[in-house]
Image (cartoon, helix red, strand yellow):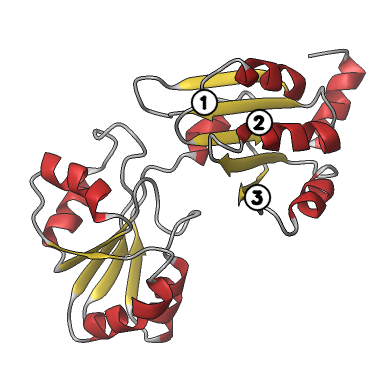
Amino acid sequence: MGNLILVPTPIGNLEDITLRALRVLKESDVILAEDSRNSAKLFNHYEISKKVLSYHQHNEHKIYKKVVEEILNGKKVALVTDAGTPGISDPGFLIVRECIKNDIEVECLPGATAFVPALVNSGLPSDRFTFEGFLPVKKGRQSRIKELAEENRTMVFYESPYRLLKTLQDFLDHFGENRIVSVSRELTKIHEENFRGTIKEAIEHFSAANIKGEITIVVEGLKDELRRGERGGR
């Protein structure tokens, strides 16, 4: 029997990959890639030449069982996404679950993911937090944000540059303008930016900016906002 290994890949800087991850990719029989064109940059840089199959949100429901059959027949399969750790707001869950059902060994290597550096460098409490990933675009969006207005832990969100201002405005409407946020953009890349301030200040800052790149938003929890208010200001 083969196995499945989830391999984190750099979220920007190609040097942010482990030696173990490179070895696993070179030893795999098949690599499942979210977008083979994006993964090709990494594979070419490290001279990795393997059979690559597309595995993304639009086809995973159709092919994950076939991939599991290949693993049962002895194939060593590695799963990568465009950036970061598979299964974190990216495909991965379905095939992992199916492998476990079939008593197939599953490993997930430690490595790059965007929310960890964004959380740690935000200056907000990181001992307890909730990872929300991408908020619903339409249905259920406002009700979810309303629920999170009472969340005491630090909150972490992913967002696209096209919806950043809308999301910040939604946060202002439900959390208030003085809640502290940290917005990280283009982490590990040349133009990395980490903005820290109130929600109102973040809206003002990004309204005047040409927003590009992947976005991670870290938001202060309600309890810390109240404590900060008792101490007086920021």
User: Which of the image's four quarters has the N terminus?
Assistant: bottom left
What secondary structure is marked by label 2?
helix
Residue 227, by quadrant, is: top right
Which residue occupies the foreground of this view, 233 or 197?
Answer: 197
| Circle 2/circle 1 CB separation < 8 Å | yes
Q: Residues within 10 Å of mark 2 (few under 14, many from 20)?
A: some
In 3D space, how far apart are the residues under numbered discs 2 and 1 (Cα atoms)? 9 Å
Q: Is residue 205 visible?
A: yes
Q: Residues within 10 Å of mark 3 (few under 14, many from 20)?
A: some
Q: Is residue 227 left or right of residue 205?
A: right
Q: Give the number of callouts.
A: 3
Disc with the residue nearer the chain's start (1 vs 3): 3
Q: Is residue 20 left or right of residue 135?
A: left
Q: Which mark is residue 165?
A: 2
Q: Which residue is labeled 3 in the image?
A: 135
User: Which of the image's four quarters has the C terminus?
Assistant: top right
Q: Which residue is labeled 1 in the image?
A: 211
Disc 3 residue type?
A: Leu
